[in-house]
Image (cartoon, rainbow, N blue to C red):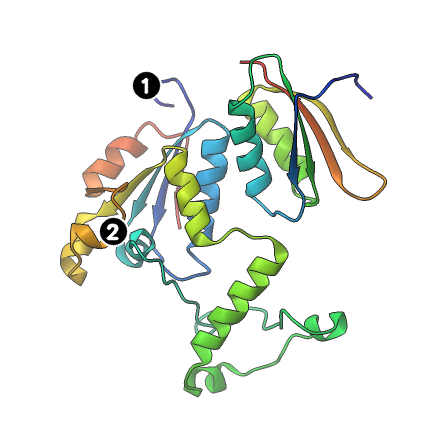
Amino acid sequence: MAEYKQDRVLDCTGLLCPMPVVKTNKALKELQVGQVLEMIATDPGSMPDMEAWARQTQHELLVAHQQEDGKFHFVIKKTH
Amino acid sequence: MSKETGKRRLALVASKGTLDWGYPPLILASAAAAMDWEVAIFFTFYGLLLLKKKLDAVVSPVGNPAMPMKMPFGPEAFQKIEWPIPNLLMSNLPGFDSVATSLMKQTFKKKGVATLEQLRDTCVELDVRLIGCQMTMDVFGFARDDFIPQCEIGGAATFLEYAADADVSLFI
């Protein structure tokens, strides 16, 4: 797994589409370029959606995987 | 693509104002805006009701024959039952639509779906252009003051000019 130090943690557990993407985008706006956001979600759709979101916004998705507890774990670096 | 900003652009027509059909345009718009796309929604005909200050969208199973009729409460096995209620019966039971509306709202809340109000607020916050149809207002007798102040009022040409440079255009 990529090494990172998160500047903020965002909990999107229990939320369905499009809220994980919407809240991630909002949280990232409040960070500085180069800072790192960690996001946790339970919506299985958040995996393909966060990947698409990262491609579209060109922020860097450092981590995107499903944890052993079934939750989805994302780490995003703000690039611009 | 937007000539001014170089961003991708989404142009939506929202033509339906029921609780169920209010979701797709607001979900797509807020997701696109969260991806830094430019977005406009043209609210026309019944879709215009989604711009009312007080959203009171309802759903009717009548005319939606594929709608799963499930209960949002009780034991898990009970919740999975699809109740075989004939359309003819539903359409003749007074108050059935308000029951269905209440059940859908409960189900959505329980599953973690945002409300239409929350999604609309998100769109406003993300600078989605919300265009109410002037002609629909005239036809159905609405006033500017019936709608949220953040929307603008326009016509087909207003929307089409925006949609001419869109990467994605959808009619919902």
**What's the residue type where badge 2 is placed?**
Phe
Which x, y percent locates residue A55? 59, 24
Which x, y percent locates residue B118? 45, 48
- Name the quarter where the N terminus of chain B is drawn: top left
Same chain check for tags 1 and 2: yes
For the residue pair A45 and A11, the one nearer the viewer reads as A11
Q: Which residue is mark 1?
A: B3
For the residue pair B11 and B131, the one nearer the viewer reads as B131
Work out whether residue B66 can be spotted: no
SS at badge 1: loop
**What's the residue type where badge 1 is placed?**
Lys
| Quadrant in which residue B111 is drawn | bottom right
Which x, y percent locates residue B98? 44, 75
Query: Seen in the image, is B171 located left or right of residue A32?
Result: left
| Marks 1 and 2, the one that precedes in the sequence | 1
For the residue pair A26 and B6, the one nearer the viewer reads as A26
Task: Look at 75% across and 69% down and name the residue there.
Answer: B76
Q: Which residue is mark 2?
A: B147
Picture layout, residue B20 above or below residue A75: below
| Quadrant in which residue B149 is drawn | top left
Query: Seen in the image, is A45 located left or right of residue B142?
Result: right
